Image (tube, grey):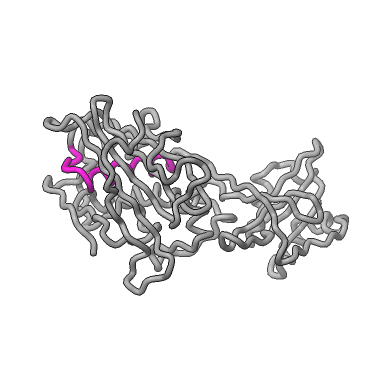
Amino acid sequence: MLMDKRNRENRCLYTSPAGLCPGTSPLHPKEHYLPAGLGNFEGDVRLRDFICYDCQKRFAQLEEVFLRNSTEAFFRKILGVQGRKNNNPKNIFVEPTLGLPPLTVKAMHPSLQQEFLWEMNSDTEAYLMHQLLFRKPDGTFVHVPIRSGLIEKKLEEQSPTWREWQLVACIAGEKDEEELQNVVGDALKQMPDSPLDVAESQQIEGQMNAMISLPYIRAIAKIAFHYVLAMFQFSGFEDEFDDLKRFIYHGAGEPLAKIVDDVILPEVEPDHVRLKQWSHILTAEFNQDGFFARMLFFAGPRLKPFTWRVRLGANPSRILPQRSIGWRYTYSDEPSTSGYVGKAAELQQGPMIFAKL
């Protein structure tokens, strides 16, 4: 069952302050404050008529970065989290997102003792990506994922002098053989043969790198703000939210979201304690110091993720000096036929569970 909260102002939330949405597009009837790509959670809240279709399209680009070019994208992939089924599948380890470079997972080849690009198939399986590995004259290495039809273009994007580099390794499929011969054929002939096979039971240790981009931070801020609108009795048109809305809409002003060491739940502290099920945890509170949200995404059995804190503005309440709310969104261990990936539930702890500002 899903609950709704409806906007009573009959205009897009981002028509104020001035200079944001012109308010000419119809209102969108249903919005997920958690991106739909994270799945539907039973008991969650939907926002109705809060933003217009034009703003929905604008913010969809921010969510695209959040879902496909971030640590959250990595965990969506390895845990098999599905969102809207009609979305075009995308290889987050090869294809860029809105001009941002793809995620990279680098690990040493167990027998060659050389770092390569890997693609995660699940939380326990990885395989070597199709790639070109070059050694530059200064001794540093460059990894270039192979994208069919774009090999030379991607090399030129790396550097106009890439032809001066030494080709150390090439991992590719038959469909790219002709293109590779046209682009790096001479270098392929000079490249020594090396066995690249990896045993199925071989364990490797790698590192995933994702860019913390401005669109990603804006997506984080938007999730926090719309979560607050769903859970608190504020309209979103309060003046205290103006700076936040400018940042979400335009990226204007200083970033209002940052990574902190705050404690949200004792279950994810200390380091040796972990949640038993993969979850997202969203909290928000206001007091004399201001209005803040804190969020953890993909906290689980083998991970304590970093905490995002978003400054929403000053306390907009004219009655309450302080209040706090927290929700946990837990993924089910088994697939469901109901269309839900798990359940949303309000945390029953009091305000002291949240870290001091």
Rendering coords of residue 174 (x, y %): 72, 70
Rendering coords of residue 239 (x, y %): 19, 31
Specify the farthest residue to the bottom: 337
Task: Give the magenta range.
Answer: 215-237
Magenta span: helix, strand or loop, mainly?
helix
Q: Is residue 163 visible?
A: yes
Q: Is residue 43 above or below residue 56?
A: below
Residue at x 42% of width, y 69% of height: 334
Q: Is residue 246 above or below residue 103?
A: above
Q: Quadrant of the N terminus?
A: bottom left
Residue at x 65% of width, y 51% of height: 153
- Left of 353 or right of it: where is 231? left
Q: Is residue 84 above or below residue 47?
A: below
- Left of 136 or right of it: where is 153? left
Rendering coords of residue 176 (x, y %): 70, 65
The stretch drawn in magenta includes residue 78 = no
The stretch drawn in magenta includes residue 224 = yes
Rendering coords of residue 24 (x, y %): 20, 48
